[in-house]
Image (spheres, grey):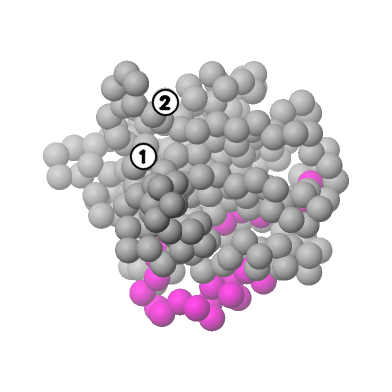
């Protein structure tokens, strides 16, 4: 399997960008990460940079792709963010990561940065946000589509940079079936997916010949809907061939 990818990250309507992205394909192995620093706590850019740095360094060591290894990588990233905190600067970050090799396709995430998997042009899998608005969905109070407009959509239940005593949940991990040529992935921060619905992601995927074209089509939708004060936005598009 070969992987082709394109990434984008932007400050959006904010003074500076607290998102970080990383994508690298080497042989039949792909690593892609999107992290969204939480600026309301201060130092969100530092938190997202540390998370991406720790996760990418961890997986550059050719570790076995197991649930335990995936959780261990997120544990180390969490420790790095915690170590950088100080009174008055308790920064945090979300993270969504995709890892593929010849035998495995694994997704791990914490917070509300998402990873979508598309097969046959349709969304076959997406991560579940760790947020108050997702909790409202789980309780039947709102629909999944209403998350984008929910008043608590930015309130997170989990993030890197939180103390995690025994028994407290951290990252979620999922393993997907073997990939096929034509499959695709989208990793993105909430500043991106809030403005593009899943149906629109599918429609633009069907029109695109490359990951760059796919991102460009979706970014055009974002540009038509933002008000100039919108959040940082980041995305990585991946095509499998």
Q: Earlier in the sequence, mark 1 or mark 2?
A: 2
Residue at 67%, 71% (x, y): give it. Answer: 217
> Where are the magenta residues, as a range?
217-241
- Regarding mark 2 in the picture, which secondary structure is present there? helix
Tag count: 2
Q: Position of residue 71 (x, y in %)?
A: 49, 25
Against 116, residue 220 (above or below) is below
Against 19, residue 227 (above or below) is below
Q: Position of residue 229 (x, y in %)?
A: 36, 74
Query: Is the N terminus in the top left, top right, bottom left or bottom right quadrant?
Result: top right
Are the residues tagged 1 and 2 within 8 Å (C-beta)?
A: no
Residue 153 falls in which quadrant of the image? Answer: bottom left
**Alpha carbon distance from label 1 to label 2:** 13 Å
Against 129, residue 81 (above or below) is above
Residue at 27%, 29% (x, y): give it. Answer: 163
- Regarding mark 1 in the picture, which secondary structure is present there? loop
Q: Position of residue 199 (x, y in %)?
A: 66, 65
Q: Is residue 238 magenta?
A: yes
């Amino acid at each position: 399997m070969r992987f082709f990818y394109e990434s984008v990250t932007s400050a959006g309507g904010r003074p500076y960008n607290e998102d970080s992205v990383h994508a690298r394909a080497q042989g039949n192995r792909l690593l892609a990460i999107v992290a969204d620093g939480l600026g309301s706590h201060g130092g969100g850019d530092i938190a997202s940079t540390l998370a991406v740095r720790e996760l990418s360094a961890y997986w550059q060591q050719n570790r076995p792709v197991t649930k335990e290894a995936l959780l261990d990588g997120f544990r180390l990233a969490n420790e790095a963010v915690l170590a950088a905190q100080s009174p008055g600067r308790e920064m945090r970050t979300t993270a969504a990561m995709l890892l593929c090799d010849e035998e495995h396709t694994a997704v791990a995430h914490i917070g509300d940065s998402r990873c979508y998997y598309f097969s046959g042009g349709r969304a076959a899998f997406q991560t579940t946000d760790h947020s108050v608005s997702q909790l409202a969905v789980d309780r039947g109070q709102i629909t999944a589509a209403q998350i984008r407009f929910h008043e608590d959509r930015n309130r997170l239940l989990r993030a890197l940079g939180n103390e995690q005593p025994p028994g407290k949940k951290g990252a979620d991990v999922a393993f997907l079936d073997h990939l096929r040529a034509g499959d695709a992935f989208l990793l993105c921060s909430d500043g991106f997916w809030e403005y593009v619905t899943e149906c629109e992601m599918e429609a633009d995927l069907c029109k695109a010949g490359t990951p760059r074209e796919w991102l460009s089509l979706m970014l055009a939708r974002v540009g038509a809907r933002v008000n100039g004060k919108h959040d940082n936005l980041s995305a990585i598009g991946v095509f499998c061939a």
